[in-house]
Image (cartoon, rainbow, N blue to C red):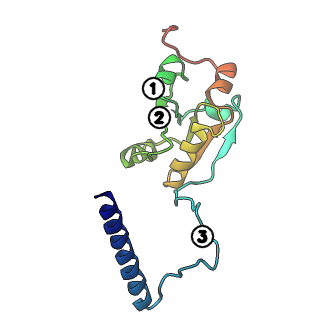
């Protein structure tokens, strides 16, 4: 019984292989059976990433009027500490920023958008800033070193301190 199953499976595989080769032969530009050049196995996804400038945590442009400050860290980290006027837009490396959020940031009326993240490599703040800039938001900056750098140089808000 087992031998019969193996023979049937082998016959089905050979039939499919023969049909595939015949179909490929009739195609105007058939696929090569043996590769003549190396295949690109890593092709980056086309992502709308813009160029952004990094700001030092003590840069005065962060605290000027009409600056929209965005915290790209997750909600728990944001709750533990954030700059007083910061808005939380958690950055997800796998999902893009929703279009409604991008429109809200773009229509905020801010002269500058400053994003800070976790300060790691890659920094979530830098990546969120690049995505916003690539999707049409102007004057987007990120804080070098992220929240850890800001915590050392600026007074923030925490749940315990309220």
- Marks 1 and 3, Cα distance to the nearest angstrom? 42 Å
Asked if the residues shown at circle 2 and circle 1 are in contact, with their CB atoms under 8 angstroms apart, the answer is yes
As helix, strand or loop, the secondary structure at mark 2 comes to: loop
Q: Residue at left 54%, top 51%?
A: 133
- Marks 2 and 1, Cα distance to the nearest angstrom? 7 Å
Dot 1, how many residues are within 10 Å of its Cα: few (below 14), some (14-19), or many (20+)? Answer: few
Nearer the camera: disc 1 or disc 3: 3
Relative horizontal placement of residue 125, taking residue 144 as reference (left or right): left
Nearer the camera: disc 2 or disc 3: 3
Residue that carries the numbered disc 2 in the rendered image: 90
| Residue 117, position as x, y percentages in the image | 58, 33
Residue that carries the numbered disc 3 in the rendered image: 39
Q: Residue at left 34%, top 67%?
A: 7
As helix, strand or loop, the secondary structure at mark 3 comes to: loop
User: Which one is in front, 73 or 70?
Assistant: 73
Residue that carries the numbered disc 1 in the rendered image: 75
Q: Earlier in the sequence, mark 2 or mark 1?
A: 1
User: Which one is in front, 61 or 38?
Assistant: 38
Q: Earlier in the sequence, mark 2 or mark 3?
A: 3
As helix, strand or loop, the secondary structure at mark 1 comes to: helix
| Residue 13, position as x, y percentages in the image | 37, 71
- Marks 2 and 3, Cα distance to the nearest angstrom? 36 Å
């Amino acid at each position: 019984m087992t031998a019969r199953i193996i023979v049937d499976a082998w016959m089905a595989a050979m039939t499919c292989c023969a049909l595939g080769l015949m179909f490929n032969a009739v195609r105007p530009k058939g696929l090569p059976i043996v590769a003549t050049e190396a295949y690109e196995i890593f092709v980056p996804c086309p992502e709308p990433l813009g160029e952004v400038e990094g700001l030092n945590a003590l840069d005065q442009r962060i605290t000027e009027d009409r600056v929209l400050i965005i915290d790209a860290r997750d909600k728990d980290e944001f709750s533990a500490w954030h700059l007083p006027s910061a808005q939380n837009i958690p950055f997800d490396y796998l999902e893009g920023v929703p279009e409604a959020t991008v429109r809200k940031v773009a229509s905020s009326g801010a002269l500058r958008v400053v994003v800070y993240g976790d300060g790691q490599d890659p920094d979530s703040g830098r990546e969120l800033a690049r995505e916003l800039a690539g999707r049409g938001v102007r004057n987007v900056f990120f804080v070098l070193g992220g929240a850890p750098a800001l915590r050392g140089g600026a007074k923030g808000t925490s749940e315990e301190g309220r």
